[in-house]
Amino acid sequence: MADFGISAGRFVAVVWDKSSPVEALKDLVDKLQVLTGSEGRVSVENINQLLQSAHKESSFDIILSGIVPGSTIVHSAEILAEMARILRPGGCLFLKEPVETAVVNNSKVKTASKLCSALTLSGLVEVKELQQESLSPEEIQSVQEHLGYHSDSLLSLQITGKKPNFEVGSSSQLKLSIANKSSSSLFSFHCLAPVKPAVDPAAAKLWTLSANDMEDENMDLIDSDELLDPEDLKKPDPASLRAPSCGEGKKRKACKNCTCGLAEELEKEKSKEQMSSQPKSACGNCYLGDAFRCASCPYLGMPAFKPGEQVLLSNSNLSDA
C-alpha cells in the first residue's frame, strides 16, 4: 500500500465494478481508512455510476481503479477523463487493467501502448507502467464472463498517471521584459521575441515623402509622362495584336474567348451574308405593308417593318414567291 503514496489526511477514491470481489473490496477499503486516518476520507464508487456522480473538480488526491484483487475493469476514454477531472492538481491515478499483447483488430481490450496513450489524452502526465503480470485463473474467467472476451495473450497491467499542477482552464500571466537587457539576455529570448535589425536613418529618409515635399520647389520630382517614349504613345495596329496563327488556314475560325477582334469581324461578315441572301425589293415599298406591295411580293401577309430592318422569310414564303 505504501507504493500508492497514501498517508494521513489524504482523500482517496476506490473505483470498482461487478467483477470486483466484495470481500476483497471491503478489505482494501478498511486498510485505506487506517492509512488516511480521521482527517482523510475514502470514497467507494462504482465505475458505471462515476459519470453521474456529484463529485466536484479536484476532489481527490489519489484514485485507485481496478486495484481490488480479482477485478478486470476496462476503462473507457470518458471514464479516464472524469477521473482526471476529479483529481486534484498534482494528484495520482493508479489503475489496473487487462491488456492484450497481440495485435487484434476491433478488440475490446487495449494494448499496453494504447492504454498509456488513453491516459495521456485524458490530460494526465508522467504516465508510466508499474507492473505487468499474468492473469490468474479467476481473472481469466472474469474476463470471459464480464467482458465476453476470449484470448490466450492477456496480461494484467498496472499503470499510473499524474495530473498537472494546474486546473483545466486556469491561466497565468507571463512577465517578460527584454528592454535594456544585455546582448546575452537578448540571445536567450531570441526564440520568444526576435530582435529586429536596426534601420539606417539615411535609408529610411530616402523612402519618406510627405505632402509638404510635393509643394517644395527645392524637391526634385520626376514627371511620370517624361518616362514615356513617343513610340509608347502610338496606338498599336490591331493586326499586330493578333496571334500569328489566328484566322489562318482554309477556314477562318476565331479562338475561344477571342480578344483580337476576329470573332466580331466574322460575326459582321455573317450578318452581311444573311442580308444579301434576302430577296431585294423591286419597287421599294415592301416595308410599308400589303397595301403598297406588288402581287408577287414575297412579304405579302407580313406586317410592315422599318426600312433596313432585317426580316427573315421562311422557306414556305420563298417557295410561294
Image: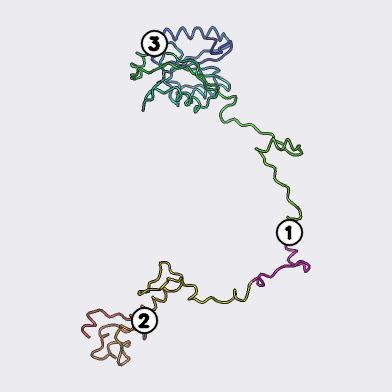
SS assignment at label 3: loop
Mark 2 = which residue?
272
Question: In the image, is 220 to the left or to the right of 142?
Answer: right
Q: Does the magenta stretch include residue 211?
A: yes
Residue 175: image location, x then y, percent: 69, 34
Q: Is residue 31 magenta?
A: no
Q: Which residue lies furthest to the left in this view?
A: 320
Q: Residue 306 carries which label?
A: none
Magenta residues span 207-227
Near-viewer residue (145 or 201): 201
Instruction: Using the numbered discs, state the Cα–Cα distance from disc 2 to disc 3 in whole angstroms.
Output: 101 Å
The mark closer to the camera, 1 or 2, is 1
Question: In the image, is 162 to the left or to the right of 262?
Answer: right
C-beta proximity under 8 Å, tags 2 and 3: no
- The tally of labels here is 3
Question: In the image, is 281 to the left or to the right of 74?
Answer: left
SS assignment at label 2: helix
Three-letter code, disc 2: Lys
Mark 1 = which residue?
206
Instruction: Using the numbered discs, state the Cα–Cα distance from disc 1 to disc 2 in whole angstroms.
Output: 62 Å
Residue 310: image location, x then y, percent: 34, 81
Three-letter code, disc 3: Ser
Mark 3 = which residue?
136
Dot 2 crowding, Cα within 10 Å, few <14, some 14–19, many 20+: few
Say which label, 3 or 1, has the lower sequence index: 3
